[in-house]
Amino acid sequence: MAKIAYILLCHKGPEAIIGQAEMLTAAGDYIAIHFDGRANPEDFQQIKTALAGNPNVTFARKRLKCGWGEWSLVQATLLAVEAAVQAFPRATHFYMLSGDCAAIKSARYAHEFLDAEDVDYIESFDYFESDWIKTGMKEERLIYRHWFNERKNKWLFDTSFHLQRKLGLKREIPHDIQVQIGSQWWCLRRRTVEWILNFTRERRDVIRFFRTTWIPDETFFQTVVRHLVPDSEIRTRTLTFLMFTEYGMPQTFYNDHYDLLLGQDFLFARKISPEAIELKQRLGALYSNDEAEFKISNEGRSLFKFLTGRGRIGRRFGSRFWETESTLGRHRELMIVICKKWHVAKRMLEQIRQYTNVPAIEYLFNEEHTDLPDLGGIQSSLSKRTRHRRALMRMLFDYYETDQLIVCMDPSALDLLQDFASDRSTTRMLEVQCVFTDEYLIGHAMRVGLAGEQTSAETLERLLPTIRGDMTFESDKIRDAEFEHLYVVNETRDPEENAGPIAAFLDIDHDKARAIAQSEHLFAD
């Protein structure tokens, strides 16, 4: 009978990881865990302590700092696979999981399913001939070297890419491999993973190539498996059920999706919402139920596509089943920097980035050209961003794989502030109050079209008190709204006074907050 070694890559939620490991190993299977090196070391210690007495649990020998789209994700997977191969000689299959995956079948069903055919399950489509990549880079992912992370160092990523293209610094793909692409959620036989580990030791040229490709977790295993395993022993599919919205982001599942998930022809599903406690409990009980029977209808993706179409053409009669939870997520924290002087808020964000790892985005609801990732088009205009504000924010949380996000907003956007404050997520706000000189107000009047180069001094003199009063009114309205978590810093206060609100807003220690408040030229015009 099949014995599964689960390969778990995770970076948060120690209690959930412990529960997942205990559930999977209780059925006699195994698990090898790689916990991100960037994550809280106390969380990792909690996991190790809780699972120390479980002989069916092992850990990667080294914790790497992983980044989306980087080789580090592949390397972390290889470390976990290596640990599983060494620790669990009876394991017959190795199944790739993330922390937000959950079993949607029983262990008995999974074992019988894998016993039915002696094959590997991995999506692997021809990289150049398939349409697996819908938008963005394709050939450029491979033929240019990518040393920087697009999400963390976008300017360096773009500059390096454009410089290589300008100088014609293309490189050759290793001549004897045919690059494949597909989902990273695979299930491979023991013989296959042993071949892969040997391949990584023998073919350093291929490893060097993939190290500087972009998003190699979608290409490395897919390519190597095709290179090593006969086509007749590969099923080009994943055993993990996942769906994508029309914007190309993974769909999240909630409590009321239990029956839908059980009917799909898959063993696991992702992404399960952290708030779907009841769903997780029911699926956990199901995994150990040897008597459970499953009727496979497999309508999930077609139903999802059909209902999406109905909604988009205006024939929506009820709530879409994937939109039953419109909240950002109770477990998430949205932090909003509110400031009329946009350049001051941007300077503050630069300082915040130096002292925290929280993704920070500038005026996404005010500036058309704010630097945003490709989210399938929802980010393409200010009107779309504002109209789909919660969907946009959820997608940004998912894109950055974070439960904390910082954004900037203008104090005039009271409706946006109130909307986010009413969400079940935690919303914290930091109002940055500035001194508005006459010179600044004149420049502001010109930027918004209230004045021009030929506007007379007399007209400006009459206009300035009105503009100043309008800015004061916006600030007063924010205070009148009585937001639960509103903190205020003021240009006229000394850095020590401003450090307290910054510390509370960011949940950081006072010394870091003081360093942010003391930033040189923070409030300068």
Image (cartoon, helix red, strand yellow):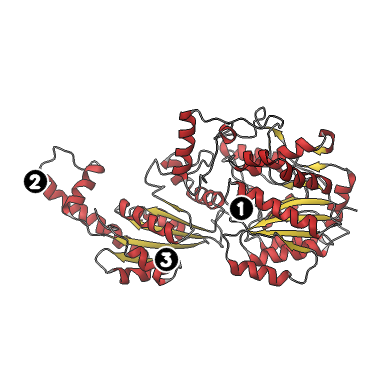
Residue 409 in the figure: left or right of residue 262: left
Which one is closest to the eye, mark 3 or mark 2? 3
Q: Nearer the viewer, residue 73 or 86?
A: 86
- The residue indicated by pointer 1 is 324
Residue at image coords 69%, 72%: 49
Q: Is residue 186 left or right of residue 485?
A: right
Residue 324: x %, y % from top left: 61, 53
Q: Residue 336 at x, y = what percent?
A: 41, 58
Q: Residues within 10 Å of mark 1 (few under 14, many from 20)?
A: few
Secondary structure state at the residue bearing disc 1: loop
Q: Are marks 2 and 1 in contact (CB under 8 Å)?
A: no
- Is residue 46 among the parts visible in the rendering? yes
SS state under label 2: helix
Q: Give the x, y percent position of residue 445.
A: 21, 46
Amino acid carrying mark 2 in the image: Glu
Residue 437 percent coordinates (x, y)? 18, 55
Pointer 3 local density, CA inside 10 Å: few below 14, some 14–19, many at least 20: many
Whichever of labels 1 and 3 marks the residue nearer the N terminus, that label is: 1
Q: Please tell me the numbered disc located at residue 505.
A: 3
Q: Is residue 410 left or right of residue 100?
A: left
Question: Which residue is at a point 39% across and 70% down the rendered structure image?
Answer: 511
In the image, is residue 92 above or below residue 433? above
Residue, far left: 458
**Relative to residue 16, is residue 98 depicted above or below?**
above
Residue under circle 2?
A: 458
Circle 3 SS class: helix
Q: Residues within 10 Å of mark 2 (few under 14, many from 20)?
A: few
